[in-house]
Image (cartoon, rainbow, N blue to C red):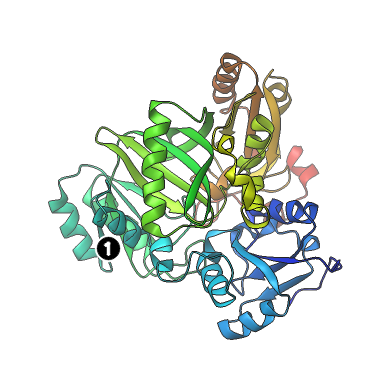
Amino acid sequence: MMAVRREAQGNPVVAIVDAYSTARHLAPLFHGRGYDCVHVQSTAKLPEDAYTFRSENFIDNVVLSGDRESLVTAIAAHRPVAVLAGADEGVEVVDFLSERLGLRTNGTALSHVRRDKFSMVEAIKAAGLRGASQTLATDGASLLRWYGSCGFERVVVKPLHSTGNDGVFFCQTEDEVASAFDQLVGTDNALQRKNNAVVAQEYLEGVEYYVNTVSVEGRHFVSDVHSTSHLNVNGILDLLGGSQLLPRRGPVQDELTAYAFAVLDVLGITNGPAHTELKLTPDGPCLVETHARVCGADLPLLVRSALGESQLEWTVDAYVNPERFDDPRRSDYVIDRHAVCVNMISSGSGVLVAYPKLDQLRSLPSFHAALVRVAPGQQIDRTVGDFSYPILIHLLHPSLTVVERDYATIRYLDGDGFYQVAKCGLLPDGRGKTNRECGLTLSQWKR
């Protein structure tokens, strides 16, 4: 139990499980509506994204120690009016708590389908939706047999349970498939679960999109839709380079949202937020995966600046003011300013000394914000996925042409000369040593 850092105001209570990453912004919004918040920590050891946790926003922090019945008792004492998930690792706990406490819930019957990436795709295919050809492998030999007979030149190998791009490998040879299996099985993923199996899927050709939604008693509403761009860099075939907010309506958006709604129905996501990643293949939309929580990487903050509200506000409304969803205008947002999120990509590792060109980037007409994850003096790693982007840049402007030009400029700047990195040697895993490991101060690095 962590120290209580916020005094209870005697207000009704909302419980948030794993309020990390973007979900750290939920509690202040509930406070603004007159609710206190209790935090539930679903793991004894905090995950990688837990550095974002803000304990001062909660009147209590209850840690799940393995005994779920004790957790029910502890949370019931606060008499919550709602329980919702902030991060992937909390989804199954939320389903259990909300069901046991008789609150609005997605229930536990399909909890495993919402978190098990193999079962998720099998479920939508059984319902007649387009889904990737795939296999579940617990041993390398069976995985290689599948790869040899699947007929796909390129496949994706990833953990059965995880989040973001953690442990995702793009493979096009037997050696790469075998190596991906060996690097995953037996190791802990980003959710602190042991990888006992891997999912291997056909590589889906096409542009990837996000459809962010909020559901109320089985009715689904779109808060925002994004297209994404990817790069083949740092040994990663499809490294996410950025995302662009799209208008709510259009032939592509209508096709994507209809498919996403069908996926939510199959997965039993009837209440609360969801972040659905899908590709528009030559055969139509196809699911990458759906997460029963708000969109990550602080993307809703950019959406809020562009639209006036985001999935965060929609989520709070779903639990404390669901009547707003009866307004037919709610589902069609209008873009006042065009928005793009740019993921900056480091090609090397070491101790970050400075971002020499950051001021040049800040001077761009559409620059809105820089979300700095790695500051000078800290370890910077080669970017290979969600947990290693050093900076996220938010662009915002009434002119789409200006935003697109600035995005191209940033991609040009994000190369040699953008990162001043000092190295004193390499660790066995290839990462640069930190200044502490080298016994030097940051001022010595600068010399």
Number of marks: 1
Instruction: Determine whether, in the image, residue 10 is placed left or right of residue 261.
Output: right
Report the amino acid beneath label 1: Leu
Rendering quarter of residue 181:
bottom left
Towards the viewer: 78 or 140: 78
Rendering quarter of residue 344:
top right
Q: Residue at x 20, y 65 (%)?
A: 141
Towards the viewer: 22 or 137: 22
Position above or below: 390 against 7: above
Instruction: Determine whether, in the image, residue 144 is placed left or right of residue 337.
Output: left
Residue 116 visible here = yes
Towards the viewer: 20 or 313: 313
Quarter occupied by the N terminus: bottom right
The residue wearing badge 1 is 136
Q: Residue at x 65, y 83 (%)?
A: 73
Instruction: Determine whether, in the image, residue 130 is placed left or right of residue 165.
Output: left
Tell me the SS state at disc 1. strand
Please state the horizontal and vertical placement of residue 434, each as a whole percent of the image.
66, 52
Residue 419 visible here = no
Position above or below: 64 against 35: below
Position above or below: 358 against 274: above
Rendering quarter of residue 409:
top right
Please state the horizontal and vertical placement of residue 303, each as a whole percent of the image.
62, 35
Towards the viewer: 392 or 19: 19
Please state the horizontal and vertical placement of residue 272, each as a whole percent of the image.
55, 55
Instruction: Determine whether, in the image, residue 375 is placed left or right of residue 90.
Output: right
Count residues near mark 1 (Cα–Cα under 10 Å), then give few for <14, some for 14-19, many for 20+. some
Q: Residue at x 18, y 57 (%)?
A: 146
Quarter occupied by the C terminus: top right
Please state the horizontal and vertical placement of residue 404, each as a whole percent of the image.
55, 19
The residue positioned farthest toward the left in the image shown: 149
